[in-house]
Amino acid sequence: MNEYLCELSLGDVDGPTVAIKDSIDIAGYPTIAGSRALADTPPAVRHADVVERLLDAGWHIVAKANMHELAFGMTGINDYTGTPLNPQDPSRIPGGSSSGSAAAVGRGLVDAALGTDTGGSIRGPAACCGTIGLKPTFARVSRRGVAPTQTTLDCVGPFAREMRVLAQTMAAITAGFDLAAAVAPVHNGTVGVVTVDASPDILDAVIRAASLARLVARELDLPGFTDAFEAGLTVINAETWQAFGHLLETGKVGAGVDTRLQAASLTTAAHIEAAETVRRRFTRVVDQALDLVDVLILPTLPALPITVEAARSGASVIQMSSLIRPFNLSGHPALSLPLPLAGTHLKAGLQIVGRHGADEQVCAFAAHFEAALR
């Protein structure tokens, strides 16, 4: 099945099941990151820290999950390893880069899955596939044994169909994660509804969610939001080129990723310096907004995912990450929760953003919204 690169069985066969994105090392298996250019990579000699922790906690690892090649794309389309089917609508893209992780959870093949999020690669597929996905606070979860090795953006995080399971997964992979706080009831909470550009039906659904959850809501602007999106693109281009640019010499990188890597090679030191200035400024803006409310809420994606056919025909998907990439730049924890829309069975994503290190509070608010929207 296209959700999986390979099936395996590690850990307690009676434990909860989990799939691991193929940019995360599992000892005895090669980590090829969905790329023909890495097909001859030797098997990993040791587990990534998150894999070791899952096994120690009694989880059953059943597969390496498929992904957008080199974690450098938003569609999830992969002509080498196959494209996972979107469980909400097979004609639509599953989202990238953690496509297999999101699709496997959405289809009920596993209880949970791990993905990585550098520019929205957990939250985007979660919104596409109708699952929950959490990008933790930057550096909250160990990245030892995860590609790329050097990053200022990327985070390992979980997918699940229920907040209870997602919180349990976080507790398994994260030392010091307070499971009790992550599932604690929310009383008299306040949310900041971020003013953004998105489809009217999705914006209406966000407002409706706050009303159903009986939370005090106030509109908030985040000055520099678009600049943070552009700066995030600059940083991911520079860091992905540094990690994988040498693979262009193999001639085996897929056409779309090849083109983006070529463009990423043009990133200059001046571009990076400017992006880092934006990072510092936007991080302060988000911190200041979170001094006024408990969490921020906004759509995960500005629109429903496009079709696979449209993506293959060249339709641009860069704006898919317009509402999620800024929080990679700032490092704040951000979660996508399925968001019902009027007049369709398809769900969008409600994005919930919290203070640095307050991943448990983000989970608690997500559980509160989950109950209200059920």
Image: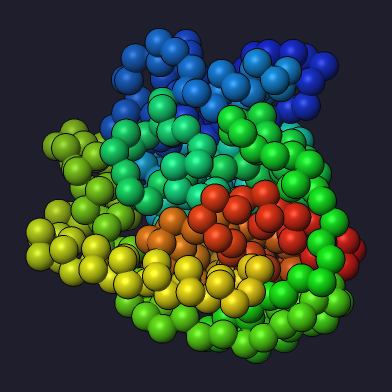
Q: In this view of the protein, which residue sits in the foreground, 303 or 116?
A: 116
User: How far from the left and from the top, in percent, is residue 340?
Assistant: 79, 71
Q: In this view of the protein, which residue sits in the foreground, 314 or 21?
A: 21
Q: In this view of the protein, which residue sits in the foreground, 370 or 139?
A: 139
Picture quarter with the N terminus = top right
Above or below: residue 220 compared with residue 52:
below
Q: What's the coloring here?
A: rainbow
How many callouts does the rendering have? 0
Q: Would you say residue 25 is visible in this rendering?
A: yes
Residue 226 occupies quadrant:
bottom left
Q: In this view of the protein, which residue sits in the foreground, 306 or 349?
A: 349
Residue in the picture at 59% in, 62% down: 354
User: How far from the left and from the top, in percent, is residue 157?
Assistant: 56, 43
Above or below: residue 227 compared with residue 279:
below
Residue 3 occupies quadrant:
top right
User: How far from the left and from the top, in percent, is residue 361?
Assistant: 68, 55
Residue 353 occupies quadrant:
bottom right
Residue in the picture at 66% in, 57% down: 362
Tell me: 240 left or right of 144. Answer: left
Residue in the picture at 70% in, 20% down: 57
Residue in the picture at 47% in, 37% down: 81
Q: Would you say residue 340 is visible in this rendering?
A: no
